Image: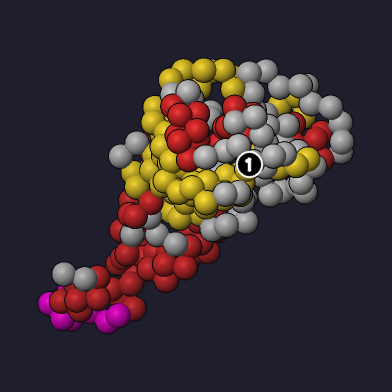
């Protein structure tokens, strides 16, 4: 039974007006949000993770008059990436670290034969490389070499701290950034499309993995260059993008969450 039919039945059985039913739903939703809910969103391209959380929190404040409610996300997505974000409210924010530790699945598009300082489309191409020697079987073989636990150097254009300052702020000023390699794990990686100069891959990895850095390292392993040209997060643990809602759906139907 859909929300419309359910609401209609409740209204008829209790002889309540639509406004009274909405107030009832809002009161129940406010209670649920404070007790804690897990909301799945499809983050739009070009939005920051903060943009999405702030939008959600603002709607709760304005439409439900919730002046004090905790809202947080379980895993950042870059502005040039879209896909699944887990947003927790109320007491459920205590579980954020648990959700962050879950394996994450991405579908990535990688442009071969060129590099950018940010390892993605945020910055312009700075070098070009040969790709004539690259064929599908070579890419497939190369990808298998990234399976398992390894050390990965984050991008200079990242939110890692360097002496108390975000690395990307230093990098955008042209200052030299030195980031320490971090241990990450690639649980699964496969080629899903091969059409030079671009390839597409599916990756399942641990917390802390930078797919931009993975793109860079794939380029190096192919004796060429590479940068990330598209990224969608499709899963976090047992949460999936197919079950997520858009911001537009959330605004229209949030009272029925």
Residue at 19%, 76% (x, y): give it.
5
Q: Is residue 165 above or below residue 109?
A: above
Residue identifier under label 1? 132
Residue 159 visible in the current orientation: no
Which secondary structure lies at badge 1?
A: loop
Pick whichever, 118 or 220, lies toward us.
Answer: 220
Q: Which residue lies furthest to the left in this view?
A: 13
Percent position (x, y) of residue 242?
34, 55
Q: Outermost residue toward the right?
A: 174
Characterize the local packing of mark 1: few (<14), some (14-19) or many (20 or more) Cα atoms within 10 angstroms. few
Q: In this view, does 208 lie to the left or right of 102?
A: right
**In which quadrant will I find the C terminus?**
bottom left
Apparent side of residue 250 relative to residue 111 in the rendered image (left or right): left
- Residue 193 appears in the figure: yes
Q: Residue at position x 73%, y 31% from top? A: 156
User: Quadrant location of residue 186?
Assistant: top left
Instruction: Give how far across and how far down residue 77 sits, in percent.
Output: 55, 44
Q: Residue at x 34, y 78 (%)?
A: 19
What colour scheme governs how the chains and residues are painted in the rendered image of this protein?
Answer: secondary structure
Quarter of the figure with the N terminus? bottom left
- Give the side of residue 48 with respect to residue 257, left or right: right
Q: Where is residue 74 in the image (x, y as percent from the top left)?
A: 47, 38
Please identify the residue farthest to the front as the structure is shown: 133
User: Which region shows up in magenta?
Assistant: 10-18
Whether residue 174 is situated above or below residue 163 in the rendered picture? below
> Relative to the observer, which residue lies in front, 148 or 179?
148
């Amino acid at each position: 039974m859909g929300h419309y039919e359910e609401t209609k039945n409740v209204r008829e059985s209790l002889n309540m007006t639509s406004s009274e039913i909405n107030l009832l739903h809002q009161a129940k939703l406010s209670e649920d949000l404070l007790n804690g809910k897990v909301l799945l969103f499809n983050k739009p391209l070009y939005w920051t993770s903060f943009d999405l959380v702030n939008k959600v929190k603002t709607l709760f404040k304005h439409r439900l008059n919730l002046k004090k409610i905790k809202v947080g996300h379980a895993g950042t997505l870059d502005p040039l990436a879209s896909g699944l974000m887990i947003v927790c409210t109320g007491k459920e924010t205590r579980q954020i670290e648990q959700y962050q530790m879950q394996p994450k699945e991405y579908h990535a598009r990688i442009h071969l034969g060129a590099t950018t300082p940010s390892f993605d489309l945020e910055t312009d191409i700075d070098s070009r490389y040969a790709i004539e020697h690259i064929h599908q079987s070579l890419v497939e073989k190369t990808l298998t070499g990234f399976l398992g636990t390894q050390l990965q150097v984050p991008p200079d254009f990242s939110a890692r701290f360097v002496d108390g300052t975000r690395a990307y702020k230093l990098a955008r000023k042209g200052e030299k950034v030195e980031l320490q390699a971090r241990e990450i794990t690639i649980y699964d990686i496969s080629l899903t499309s091969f059409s030079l100069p671009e390839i597409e891959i599916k990756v399942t990895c641990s917390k802390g993995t930078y797919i931009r850095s993975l793109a860079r390292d794939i380029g190096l392993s192919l004796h060429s260059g590479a940068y990330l040209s598209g990224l969608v997060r499709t899963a976090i643990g047992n949460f999936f993008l197919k079950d997520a809602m858009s911001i537009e759906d959330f605004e229209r139907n949030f009272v029925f969450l």
